[in-house]
Amino acid sequence: MRNSKYLAMLLGGAALLASAVASHAEGPYTIGVSNTVQGNGWREEMICAIKAQALASGKVDKLNIAHRNTDAAGQLEDLRNLISAGVDAIVVNPADPAGIKSALEEATKAGIVVVAVDQTVTEPTAYIISNNQEEYAYLGAKWLFETMGGKGSVVYMRGAAGASADSDRDKGFKKALAEFPDVTVAHEVFTGWQQDQAKQQILDFISSGLPFDGIWTSGIDNVIVDALVESQTPLVPVVGADNAGFVGQLTSVEGLKGAAVTNPGSIGGAGVTLALQILDGQKPAEQTVLVDPQIWANTTDEGMQQLKTAADPSLSPEWPVSISIPDWTTYTKEQIVACKGPGE
Amino acid sequence: MTTSPLLDATGVAKNYGAVAALRNASLSVLPGEVHALMGANGAGKSTLVKILTGAVSADSGSILIRGQAHEIRSPAQARRAGLVSVYQEPALIPDLDVASNLRLTRTPVEPFRQWVRELGVPDLDLGETARDVPLAIQRVLDLARALAIEPDVLLLDEMTAALPSDLAEKVLDVVRRQAQAGRSVIFISHRFLEIAALCDRATVLRDGETVGVVDIEPGVEERIVELMLGSRMEKARASAADADDGRQSGTTPRIGVRKLRVGAKLQDVSFDLHNGEVLGIVALEGQGQDQLFGALSGSTRPSGGVIEVDGQAVEFAHPTDAVAAGIAYVPGDRADALLMQQSVHHNIALPFSANPRSWGPIDTGRERDIVRSAIERLQIDTRAQGEVQRLSGGNQQKVTIARWIAADARTILCFDPTRGIDVRTKKEIYQLLRQLAEQGKSILFYTSELEEVQLVCDRVVVIFGGKVVDIMPAGIASEAVLTRASYGLPRDAKPASDTSAVNASDKLGPS
Amino acid sequence: MTAFFRGKGWVTGLFIMLALLLVFTRVIQPNYGANDFGSLVRAVLPFAFAVAAQTVVVIAGGIDLSVASMMALTSVIAAAMMDGATEEFALLVVPFVLLVGLSLGALNGILIVVTRVPDIVVTLAMLFVLQGAALLVLDAPGGSAAEWLKELVVGTASVPGVPEAVTDWIPKGLLLLLVCLGIVWIPLRRSWLGLSIYAIGSNQLAAFRSGVPVARTRIIAYAIGGLFGAMGGLTLTMSTGIGAPIPGPYLLASVASVVLGGVVLGGGRGGLIGPIVAVFILRLVRTDLTLLAIDPNVAAIVEGTIMVVVVMLGAFLAMRGRTQ
């Protein structure tokens, strides 16, 4: 028993050594990461996906992560620091598409591969791999309005005012709204993507007594269902993201009609894969790679099945359950949950 | 005299809400004279000064400078009109250096330097930050700064109070020369000695009105005191007959104060406070009483002398030490003592529950009993007991005393406890203090309202210029006697035999 | 000794600390050079103006919680006005935005003086008002900036007669910072108004008695704070090329740098150089943490700890100086 363990370790070590030698020509690389929202479940999963994918790829020996709450100017600072640190590639979740153009340009000039994840950037030399935010909102809103029977009033709980993901989603929502002339917006509010704030806002609205037939949320979803249940308000259809908590509610809360639209935070891991491919000389055909969302509604058997498969109580309730993206990520669930990068 | 006055204020009145601080004050200062402005506490002196210097504006009345009407709305305007003041506390900006302070007040540097030298400070560094300049020198700089802009009228408010005697001498000398040069000086001081030596005339205020203008001549002190007291004089004279000393000789005093010194303000104070006694302290403002109470309550360290508790010399490093020795301090400002947002119960319970030497759970049952008995004893109106700040001022004051009764303090230091309290509550507080004394507790009672001394105290200590000038039994401590004593004048024609302190008549030499 | 720590000593200490940090940076990243210094300066710019705004107000004995919102508002105004406009039009936009900052700052001061509501409350309310106003101007990051404005912070200055090896280390952003701060601060520091600002912060009663118009001076101090805030907003637009309506992390950073820079909260003491050097230090610490690839969650703790330790050390030295 003891011997076999020892042997396995030895073999593993040899394999690691071999892979290190083999990949020496094309690595190992140092990858820099820049992110400007800290303490949000989606973004934390993104960071963990980046770490897990870097580890799983075996081609990255060091991650240099600038991860804090700041604005575009602060991200410029972080990006320039990463340039100073001499990284090979930068995976960036941009605070603003245009606002960080100058630093991305400088990075490309310094020979650094730049991959923007989650949102688009205006710098033409940067590669982009992103969830399609407009489609995200459109899919969910369309399902909601159909479920409401094409009429009635909807509570529109947006993200953070002024964030570009929020304005992209707004476009998708408005597009769906235009297709359903009998649906009106009863109440529009910015949650700031804050759980407590959103819960308070929906409780305030419920107590106003105004009628509503559906709720669209920009991913702050499980607290909304909590609020409906706690205040014993008749359950209306709710659209949210594929956050673990909400997905669990969709399969367990009696009488709740709802749909989860996927918005995988693991897009960060995909960003690492794309960056490594480019470093290894395999450039994608297009500068921009869009990952389209899926919708899982508990009103159809197929959707229910997807929800049940995805529901995972071991994940943090704020994490999206779509922890991997086929073809783009190669890490295991244990690796992303452990949230350890190379050398940690 | 036929010369027209440099400064002529007439019919000046000022109300704060319903309270009339000044009713009808006038002040007329001739060129070349040093004019004293006098009045007892609350006579309106400081309000008149504030009006003259532009800190507040008068409701009515006129102020003429060189015959011209001036509206003085700020110190800057007063300065432009030719009236410059030097205040009790230094007016230099602490964080600016001296040169910047001069630039701020647009004071010419050369004349300033000259005055500083004449005032006896030869080596002043203009680059020094005002904060680092010793306090006494700061006062000199204030004065030099005022003199350097050659004002028509110079107002000196308690200028010499914080000065060592050699500097004070220089200041008086300069002031005298200022007058000889044809300018005027308004001189505010509690020291008859200085006034006699320096001033030509004095204006006396009482209850917000100018009650007299007198020429300064030998013996005028009596006349000024009479003016300050008004009708209270007569009834005062009558009671100044015989009285029991009230001192319990032979027993160990509860608190003994021996040659206590604190900073520059309190210079030499000795007295005994016995068990079962209410000992009054009487002093004009700023004579060192704050420092005395600070030292006894453990919040200020004495710079010399000894405090004895039950015959044992003690050193208080912190107010908790004083509390541990059974000495409780009831400050004049109730806001300093109470937790305004907390309940009456909590406030009373705090001192004895928060004994720093016994961390741990509070015995709430015992606490409730003690608090209840204290509230009953004091007849505190508890309808608003949820928050102390909703109580009346009188009831708040009772809470501050009640908490120490609950804490079973043996000695209570009361600093002007009845200021701003209605008459009925005042009487209840007097009763309470007497009751406490009868139970054997000892109480030190500073008051700014002199008639309270005979209502509450057994004996009274008068402090002037940081020194005890008189100790007398309450029986003879009429308002008149106390007023005279607190100005450093002899309490009566013949000096009392039982005072161990410096007799004021020794200090009043010929001028 | 005390005076030394109150005055030049503190600033000297900060400069030494900055120099040591630069050496340290060079050790952990031997390639750290002129380009990277330029990056540092550009990162410093918005913080430096935020700190300048806060410094003036704090010296006058106040505090301005609206500084970050002020920067956001002025930044989106500038970006929105320049969007689609000609390069020349920007010449009008800049003074207009500065005027907006000046007036809004003055409004802060007027509200504090007239309503007698504590400054912390007034400027907190203003924080929300300005933030809302910024969202009204631009509900999402957008707008654009004139090219010549963006050029102002890119690259290095070329001074005739000075070798390139030297000018490489003088980024344009640094010159912009020094000129903008100097043009306001140096005349202010030498004027009666400047003295008055120190005076009301140091001791209001004494200032009043010295003939300082306290209310007016306070309003002016807030107005100058607003002006610096607007400059900060402009540098945000210059460096990002857009305006962002959500305020960045400038409020807390400004207070932190003010304290670290030797300005006493409460007023009357300190200068502008200290806080500006403090900004450089804090930004360089951030750079070093990135270069060292410190765990991002630990980085914030390290930043905070450094700040507390330095301020405490300063207080300790000053206290030692006083007792000696």
Image: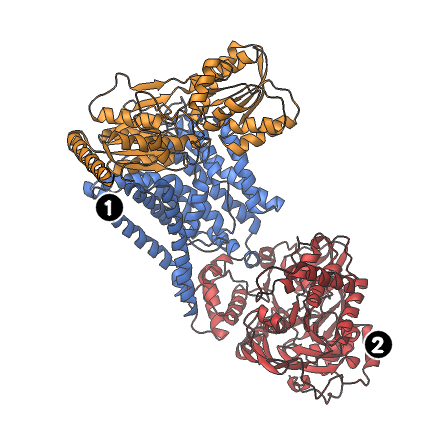
Q: Which residue is mark 2?
A: B235
Task: Report if the CB atoms under discs 1 and 2 are less than 8 Å apart.
Answer: no
Q: Nearer the viewer, mark 1 or mark 2?
A: 1
Q: To which quarter of the image does residue C231 belong?
A: top left
Q: Are marks 1 and 2 on the same chain?
A: no
What numbered label is drawn on residue C81?
Answer: none
Q: Which residue is mark 1?
A: C28
Protein chain holding label 1: C
Q: Position of residue B92 (x, y in %)?
A: 52, 62
Q: Which chain is red?
A: B
Q: Nearer the viewer, residue C273 or B299?
A: B299
Element at badge 2? helix
Q: Which residue type does callout 2 highlight?
A: Lys
- Answer whether residue B13 is visible to the viewer in this image: no
Left-right relation of B176 to C199: right
Element at badge 1? helix
Q: Measure the C-alpha gap from mark 1 to mark 2.
A: 90 Å
Q: To which quarter of the image does residue B349 belong?
A: bottom right
Circle 1 Cα neighbour tier, 10 Å, few/some/many (<14 / 14–19 / ≥20)? few
Q: Is residue C14 above or below residue C226?
A: below
Q: Which chain is blue?
A: C
Q: Nearer the viewer, residue B154 or B268?
A: B268
Left-right relation of B458 to B325: right
Protein chain holding label 2: B
Q: Residue at x 81, y 77 (%)?
A: B236
Q: Position of residue C183 (x, y in %)?
A: 39, 44
Q: Is residue B380 above or below residue B448?
A: above
Circle 2 Cα neighbour tier, 10 Å, few/some/many (<14 / 14–19 / ≥20)? few
Q: Which chain is orange?
A: A
Q: Position of residue B28 (x, y in %)?
A: 70, 66
Q: Which residue type does callout 1 highlight?
A: Ile
Residue extending farthest front: A1
